[in-house]
Amino acid sequence: MAKRDNKTITLGSGKLYVAEFTGTIPENTTLEVEENLLGLIKGGANIAYTPEFATATDDLGLVKKQKIMNEEIVLSTGLITWNGSTLAKLSATGRVEEAAGKRTTKIGGLGKDNGKSYVLRFVHEDAADGNVRATIVGKNTSGFTLPFSNEETTVDAEFTALPNDSEGTLLILEEEIPASA
């Protein structure tokens, strides 16, 4: 039975699923399917939350007020399995054609910006303590590098979250916990 309390150690990586965002976040059973797997991960995944505050204080330092002015969530990971279709999802100008046993991926051309945002779901599976799901809506904002060398080519991606509802939610973190009676 899942316990996920404040003494739970989360250990291990997970899987990253992606689908075009159409205005609502799909159910787990719709999103977490093989055809939505972006690629298998090397080096884990990171979710970084960065708030920006405005601070007002008097000259003597007797009073101070802080207010949050901006916040950013970035999901970053390395993909060890990928193909041209994966790269097209990492580029706003990516497009893919498949014909006659060949996949051709074209990237570039500012006029080809597809304007797409994606639902990204990172799933950390833990049979003992309960699964964790982190969901954002966003776009890859870091570009990518294809390092062909004597080691595996891992494509790094950073997805910057966009608001995914009318409340401005940037990250949805779901943990499996025991059901209340």
Image: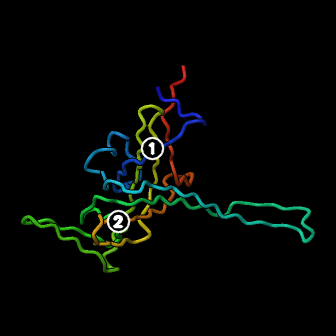
Assign a secondary structure to mark 1: strand
On the rendered structure, is 83 left or right of 122? left
* Residue 40 in picture, x, y percent from top left: 32, 53
Q: Outermost residue, front direction?
A: 150
Q: In terms of depth relative to the viewer, which is nearer, 153 or 15?
A: 153
Q: Amino acid at mark 1?
A: Arg
On the rendered structure, is 105 left or right of 12? left
* Residue 104 in picture, x, y percent from top left: 18, 70
Q: In terms of depth relative to the viewer, which is nearer, 27 or 134?
A: 134
Q: Which mark is residue 155?
A: 2
Q: In terms of depth relative to the viewer, which is nearer, 11 or 140?
A: 11
Instruction: Please say if 181 is above or below 65.
Output: above
* Residue 128 in picture, x, y percent from top left: 45, 31
Looking at the rendering, in which quadrant would you find the C terminus? top right
- Looking at the image, is mark 2 or mark 1 earlier in the sequence? 1
Residue found 43% across the figure and 46% down from its top:
12
Instruction: Please say if 68 is above or below 148.
Output: above
- Quarter of the image for residue 42 reads bottom left
Spatial CA span between label 2 and label 1? 22 Å
Colour scheme in use: rainbow
Q: In terms of depth relative to the viewer, which is nearer, 42 or 29?
A: 42
Q: Nearer the viewer, mark 2 or mark 1?
A: 2
Residue found 69% across the figure and 60% down from its top:
68
